[in-house]
Every structure is written in C-alpha cells, then in structure tokens.
C-alpha cells in the first residue's frame, strides 16, 4: 500500500495529541522490557547490488576513505545535474568500521570548489531499497518536498550530497550514528578529485530525522572530525529527545504506532545486546516485525496503523529497561554535552504535534549559553511536514550567507 503525501498530512493532523514520532520516530519504552533475555535482531535483506557491500579490507581504511565511485543516470527531479554514487568507510555506534554511501548531485556548469551542501533527507525506513540513493529513482513523494530547495541550491552552483545516513543496517532511531555518517560522507566527497569540491565551503541541512542527523553532525564535528571545516548547519523539526518521545508513546493504541515499532527494530539492529526487542514479542509482534523489516515509510505506517505495544508483547512490562533508557539518552541530542563550533540555524513549528518542543528549546538555550551563533525561526505550520517546506527558504538564505562568509546572526 502506498500512501500519498496528502494522506500523510491528514494522517498526522488527526494525531495532533501525540508528541512522539516525527519523521524520526522512536521506540516505545513499553517495547524495551526490564529483562535479561537475549534474541537475534532481524536485519534488512542485503542490497543485491555488490557496490553497497563492505570490502574485505574495510578495517584498513580511515573514516571517510572512498571505497568506490559509480556514475549514475540522471534524476528527473533534478534536471541537468550529474549524479555520482560514492561508497565510503564510516563508523557505527560501537566504534567499528562500516561501509556507507552518499549520492552527489553536481550542477550544470559547476565551477571547481563551488559550495557543497550535505542535505540529510528524512528517511523513516528499515529496508535497503528505501535508501535515498535508490529512492531518487523511485518517485518517493517525500523527495518532492525537498526538491525545490535542492534545485535552488543547484541553480546557485552548489553541489549537493545526499547521504544514506541510517547506515547499512538501516538502524532507524540511532541518531548519533547518522551524524557520524554525515561527517564521513563529507570527508569522502571532498577526497574525490573528479567532484572538484576539495576546497569547497561546506554547509549542512536536514529536516526531522534528517535534521537530527544534521544536528548530531554539527555537535560531533569538534571531536569526531576536527579537521573538517564547516560553515554552518540548518536543523529543522528535529526530535531532540527520543527518550521523552518513547515515554509518550506508552502502551496504548496509536494510529502511527508503525514508526515507533520501526524505531524499536532499528535500535535493536544497532544495539542488539542492549535492546533485544525481538525476545519479548508475541507471535503477532514477531509477525509485524517481519512484515516491517524491509519496508519504507508509507508501508511502515500502513502496517502499524492503530497498533500498540501492549498487543504485541508476550507479557506486560513492569519497569523500563535501564539499558534501553541509556541507549535512548545516548541518541538524544538534548543529553549530549558536546557543543557545535559552527553557526546553527534552527527552525520548527511551535505547535508541531509530533516532537517535544521543550527539548528543542532546551538545546537552543544550552547552545546559546555556550556561545554558539544560533538563529532560530518558528514557522506557522500546524503539522510536521508543512514546516519543512515553509522553513526551507529561510534556511537556504541563511546557508547562502554562510557560504559568502557573512557574520552569522544570533537570536540568543
């Protein structure tokens, strides 16, 4: 079943009292049981294209090293742009090497060392076919939402990188992982002479789950990629505290439960020893897990609509799993003490029903107090997706000023 963007807008408006999912989603703590049992997570089917497979000597490479380059066919949404798929070495949440990918759009008449934008698309998915590198050719309606902003950047002579920031296991919910993949993707793109961006000014942007990956990249850069020079990051509609979001889901029926379930599956993939979700599901829970394991956003929403943690658990939990809480905190930017060293533009709707606004406010206040040149913008949107479109022009204008080297404003 394919759900239209209009349906999604209506769907989320009807869920206005829920503050839990956003485009990133989160695992309900009801699924994260206080127990010591173990189970095998259900990983996505491997991508059949060998280009996406990790090489045998992966560990010998540095983060950001290029593993492969492939010219790609043109993309209808981005007329005239040359498309290049880049495989590179990154790092997972445990410090182990992984192979990741990013897709680079190069504009017509590109000037060497013209600006580079790494844009983190909102990917709410569990299957390898849902990667941006594939969805560019599948007519993903969510990409239409961002096409105008990205085409404007291309028209200004910018190259655009679109990383597959959920990683090879599609660890939906593992936000810190996304930040590391973003930074290594920029490293890789800048190391490729044929893309002519070795000395480019670099900016980051993303909305919702992509905004979270962008925010994590900005906060991690001083420690994870200190040599990487960035001019600024635009973070929109980002879930800043997935622990609070998980608590809000609880055990009751919810029309968008699918995204919560998907995030639980994704977190189990990244933290199998700390969040062994599969061990505590009943037969129905295992069946819905299996049905979602390789699904993209619309299929996940359709599969889980109206579901609840209570009906899919083998038994009722009596307490939240401490390790699960720790993992959620580790992937919540509100809890991360690191501070960006670059200017930040942050936008969201103050009435967004899907993300905890107080967590965004807390992060903004903390970053301001630490001296970050932060400009914030609240947009007049009553649901989550519209805020992405409404705020995009302001974000792009701000990014353009950073490319020009203008002093960054602050609304602290």
Image (spheres, rainbow, N blue to C red):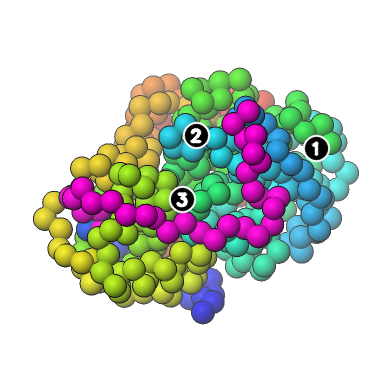
Q: Position of residue 324 (x, y in %)?
A: 27, 46
Q: CA distance from mark 2 to mark 3?
A: 15 Å
Q: Is residue 277 above or below residue 271?
A: below
Asked if residue 26 is positioned above or below residue 313 in the image, the reply reads above
Nearer to us: label 1 or label 3: 3
- Residue 329 x %, y %: 30, 39
For label 3, count other residues whose C-alpha is less than 10 Å away and answer few (under 14), some (14-19) or many (20+).
many
Question: Mark 1 = which residue?
Answer: 195
Q: Which residue is the extreme one toward the bottom? A: 1
Which of the 4 image quarters holds residue 24?
Answer: bottom left
Q: What's drawn in magenta, residue-wise?
A: 31-60
Residue depth check, mark 2 versus mark 3: number of the one nearer the observer: 2
Please report the residue visible at 43 percent of the width from the left and 26 percent of the height from the top: 339
Give the CA separation, mark 1 to mark 2: 28 Å
Q: Position of residue 126 (x, y in %)?
A: 49, 59
Q: Is residue 162 among what the camera can see?
A: no
Determine crowd level at label 1: few under 14, some 14-19, many 20+ residues with C-alpha closer than 10 A. some
292 is within the stretch colored magenta: no
What label sits on residue 171 in the rendered view?
Answer: 3
Q: Which residue is mark 2?
A: 96
351 lies above or below 333: below
The tally of labels here is 3
Residue at 36 percent across and 32 percent down: it is 336
Q: Are marks 1 and 3 in contact (CB under 8 Å)?
A: no
Residue 86 in view? yes
Front-lying residue, 125 or 144: 125
What quarter of the picture does the C terminus occupy? top left
State left or right for residue 310 relative to residue 47.
Answer: left
């Amino acid at each position: 079943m394919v759900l239209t963007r209009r349906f999604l807008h209506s769907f989320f408006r009807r869920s206005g009292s829920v503050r839990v999912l956003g485009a990133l989603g989160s695992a309900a703590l009801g699924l994260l049981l206080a127990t010591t049992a173990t189970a095998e997570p259900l990983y996505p089917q491997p991508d059949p294209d060998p280009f996406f497979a990790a090489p045998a000597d992966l560990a010998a490479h540095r983060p950001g090293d290029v593993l492969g380059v492939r010219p790609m066919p043109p993309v209808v949404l981005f007329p005239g742009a040359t498309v290049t798929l880049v495989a590179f070495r990154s790092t997972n949440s445990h410090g182990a090497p992984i192979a990741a990918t990013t897709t680079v759009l190069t504009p017509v008449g590109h000037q060497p060392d013209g600006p580079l934008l790494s844009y983190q698309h909102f990917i709410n998915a569990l299957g390898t076919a849902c990667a941006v590198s594939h969805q560019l050719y599948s007519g993903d309606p969510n990409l239409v939402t961002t096409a105008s902003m990205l085409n404007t950047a291309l028209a200004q002579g910018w190259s655009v990188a679109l990383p597959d920031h959920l990683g090879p296991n599609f660890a939906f919910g593992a936000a810190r992982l996304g930040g590391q993949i973003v930074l290594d993707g920029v490293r890789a793109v800048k190391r490729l002479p044929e893309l002519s961006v070795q000395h480019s000014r670099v900016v980051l942007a993303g909305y919702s789950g992509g905004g979270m990956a962008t925010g994590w990249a900005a906060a991690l850069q001083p420690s994870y990629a200190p040599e990487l020079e960035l001019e600024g990051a635009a973070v929109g509609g980002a879930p800043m505290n997935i622990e609070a979001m998980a608590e809000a889901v609880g055990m009751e029926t919810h029309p968008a439960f699918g995204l919560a379930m998907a995030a639980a599956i994704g977190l189990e993939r990244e933290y199998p020893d700390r969040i062994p979700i599969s061990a505590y599901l009943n037969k129905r829970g295992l069946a819905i897990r299996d049905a979602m394991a390789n699904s993209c956003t619309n299929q996940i929403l359709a599969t889980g609509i109206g579901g609840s943690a209570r009906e899919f658990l083998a038994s009722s939990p009596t307490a939240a799993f401490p390790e699960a809480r720790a993992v959620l905190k580790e992937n919540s930017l509100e809890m991360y003490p690191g501070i960006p060293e670059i200017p930040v533009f942050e936008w969201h709707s103050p009435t967004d029903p899907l993300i905890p606004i107080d967590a965004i406010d807390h992060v903004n206040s903390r970053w301001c107090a630490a001296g970050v040149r932060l400009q914030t913008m609240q947009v007049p949107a009553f649901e989550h997706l519209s805020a992405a479109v409404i705020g995009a022009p302001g974000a792009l204008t701000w990014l353009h000023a950073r490319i020009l080297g203008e002093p960054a404003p602050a609304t602290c």
